[in-house]
Image (cartoon, grey):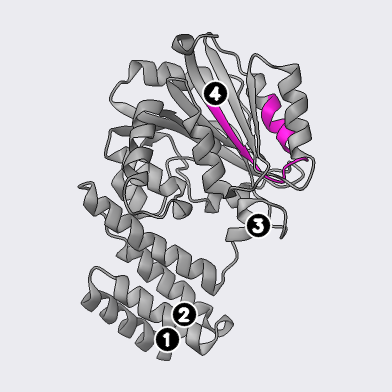
């Protein structure tokens, strides 16, 4: 396979996913396409048998799978960025090591779209949500932070904290993707805090983003602690997670300003204020003070936020 003929690089970042990585790779290898693609799979020094499973697949499919088996843990961001830097395809499709594709034509459909719509820099689809046993949870899909219909994605969607799609449904133009990563890495931004939301914001500054409205991937949502899953570590309501979220909102606003996009998350801050007030008994006095100070201090309209808090307090008294 020559680099010139390579159409897609599928990037799979894995950690502690011995139980799931085979399913992920099977869903990639079952794709029906009329072009060449590579699968770069990186195990981030997992303590289980994830690396062994990847070796088995690499031995069986040496023309497709490129294994990257680390001897030292790099963390999710470091692992992913290194794998992306190895990609050679015109397009990049991302999949986390416990998610999988449910449409055998996923790659072909997205390549066809981007080939014929040059003003779009990325495309996505819909995902279903499954648990550790592959049982579907439609109630979680209704609450998810992803677009739930097919359409062009907008900055308004971004302000409502919706993503154009879950990671496993994505396909990006590699040239734009790499330019953005290089731009961020050459700035003072802490790359350990880089997430898909930063990437989506910066891609919006390069061109259009589309969601097809078709279910093409399964997002594995695991709430068991110590599972290695992103959701198991980040979806608990706590001071640490809330503060990281609030700091992330401000960081995104600052990035948007630098790249010429108007972005205002005050509606999200009001939402988080209400949520915090409804759950404030779960926080100690010091943490509660910090959260309140951050929400007000980060607001773009501090007078409006103060007024909102007063109205909220008065409303609770009646």
Dot in front, 2 or 3: 3
| Whether label 1 touches label 4, CB < 8 Å | no
On the image, the x and y values in percent for residue 295 come to 36, 74
Taking the spot 77% from the left edge, 44% from the top edge, the residue there is: 133
Left or right of residue 114, residue 45 in this image: right
- Mark linked to residue 277: 2
Taking the spot 52% from the left edge, 47% from the top edge, the residue there is: 77
Question: Mark 3: few, some, or many residues within 10 Å (few <14, many ≥20)?
Answer: some
Residue at numbered disc 3? 232
Question: Mark 2: few, some, or many residues within 10 Å (few <14, many ≥20)?
Answer: some
Cα distance in 3D space between marks 3 and 1: 33 Å
- Mark linked to residue 57: none
- 246 drawn magenta: no
Cα distance in 3D space between marks 2 and 1: 10 Å
Left or right of residue 161, residue 71 in this image: right
Residues drawn in magenta: 10-26
Dot in front, 3 or 1: 3
Question: Mark 1: few, some, or many residues within 10 Å (few <14, many ≥20)?
Answer: few
Cα distance in 3D space between marks 2 and 4: 43 Å
| Whether label 2 touches label 4, CB < 8 Å | no
């Amino acid at each position: 396979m020559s680099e010139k003929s390579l159409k897609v690089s599928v990037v799979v970042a894995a950690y502690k996913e011995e139980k799931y990585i085979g399913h992920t790779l099977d869903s990639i290898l079952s794709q029906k396409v009329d072009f060449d693609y590579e699968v770069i799979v990186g195990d981030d020094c997992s303590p289980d048998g994830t690396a062994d499973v990847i070796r088995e697949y690499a031995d069986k499919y040496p023309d497709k799978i490129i294994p990257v088996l680390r001897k030292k843990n790099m963390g999710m961001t470091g692992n992913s960025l290194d794998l992306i830097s190895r990609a050679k395809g015109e397009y990049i499709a991302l999949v986390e090591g416990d998610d999988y594709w449910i449409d055998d034509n996923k790659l072909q459909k997205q390549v066809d779209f981007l080939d014929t719509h040059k003003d779009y820099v990325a495309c996505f689809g819909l995902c279903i949500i499954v648990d550790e046993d592959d049982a579907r949870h439609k109630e979680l899909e209704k609450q998810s932070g992803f677009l739930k219909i097919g359409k062009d994605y907008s900055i308004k969607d971004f302000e409502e904290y919706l993503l154009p799609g879950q990671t496993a449904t994505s396909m990006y133009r590699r040239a734009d993707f790499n330019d953005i990563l290089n731009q961020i890495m050459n700035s003072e931004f802490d790359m350990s805090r880089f997430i898909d939301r930063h990437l989506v914001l910066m891609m919006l500054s390069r061109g259009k983003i589309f969601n097809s409205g078709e279910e093409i991937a399964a997002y594995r949502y695991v709430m068991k602690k110590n599972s290695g899953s992103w959701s198991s570590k980040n979806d608990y309501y706590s001071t640490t997670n809330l503060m990281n979220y609030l700091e992330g909102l401000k960081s995104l606003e600052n990035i948007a300003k630098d790249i010429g996009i108007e972005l205002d998350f005050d509606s999200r801050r009001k939402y988080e204020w209400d949520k915090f007030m409804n759950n404030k008994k779960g926080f100690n006095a010091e943490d509660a003070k910090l959260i309140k100070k951050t929400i007000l201090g980060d607001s773009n309209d501090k007078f409006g936020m103060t007024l909102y808090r007063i109205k909220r307090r008065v409303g609770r008294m009646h």
